[in-house]
Amino acid sequence: MWNDLTDRERREAMACYYASITEIDAQYGRLIRRLEERDALNNTIVVFNGFDFDELYNLDEDPYEMRNRANDSACAERLRELVAQLWRKIRETGDDALSNANHPILKLVPYGPEG
């Protein structure tokens, strides 16, 4: 797809991307500062996923995160293990914000909170 764009279209797409990332970075920074002000950063897990799909990468083989393996059947068990670990940490810390969320994120429902 990228190769099919004209130079101008590429520049416009990059400008939109960088604008989005800049906004996300600003809001994430705002969240971290608020947690620090409340002395809550060390007792908080921040789960960030800007997409409506799971992501799982082998950073040794794919350091630029070009091949998402979340839907790879060979990685299904590892993904379940990682998500179960996330839910265990949520239970251990008593942080129920994620389980009470109105928006289904990270496809956690099949594996948690009892996973």
Image (spheres, rainbow, N blue to C red):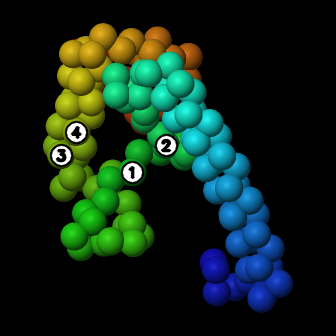
- As measured in the structure, the alpha-carbon distance from the residue carrying label 3 to the one carrying label 1 is 12 Å
- As measured in the structure, the alpha-carbon distance from the residue carrying label 2 to the one carrying label 1 is 8 Å
Looking at the image, is mark 3 or mark 4 nearer the viewer? Answer: 4
Q: Position of residue 84 (x, y in %)?
A: 22, 29
Q: Which residue is mark 1?
A: 55
Asked if labels 1 and 2 touch by Cβ distance under 8 angstroms, the answer is yes
Looking at the image, is mark 3 or mark 2 nearer the viewer? Answer: 2
Q: Position of residue 111 (x, y in %)?
A: 27, 26
Q: Is residue 36 left or right of residue 110?
A: right
Of the residues under marks 2 and 1, which one precedes in the sequence?
Answer: 2
Name the residue type under label 3: Arg
Of the residues under marks 3 and 2, which one precedes in the sequence?
Answer: 2
Q: Is residue 57 visible?
A: yes
Q: Is residue 45 left or right of residue 4?
A: left
Q: Which residue is mark 4?
A: 82
For the residue labelled by badge 1, is the local secondary structure a helix, a strand or a loop? Answer: loop
For the residue labelled by badge 2, is the local secondary structure a helix, a strand or a loop? Answer: loop
Of the residues under marks 4 and 1, which one precedes in the sequence?
Answer: 1
- As measured in the structure, the alpha-carbon distance from the residue carrying label 2 to the one carrying label 4 is 15 Å
Q: Is 110 above or below relative to 30?
A: above
Of the residues under marks 3 and 1, which one precedes in the sequence?
Answer: 1
Q: Residues within 10 Å of mark 3 (few under 14, many from 20)?
A: few
> Any mark on residue 75, and which?
none
Q: Which residue is mark 3?
A: 78
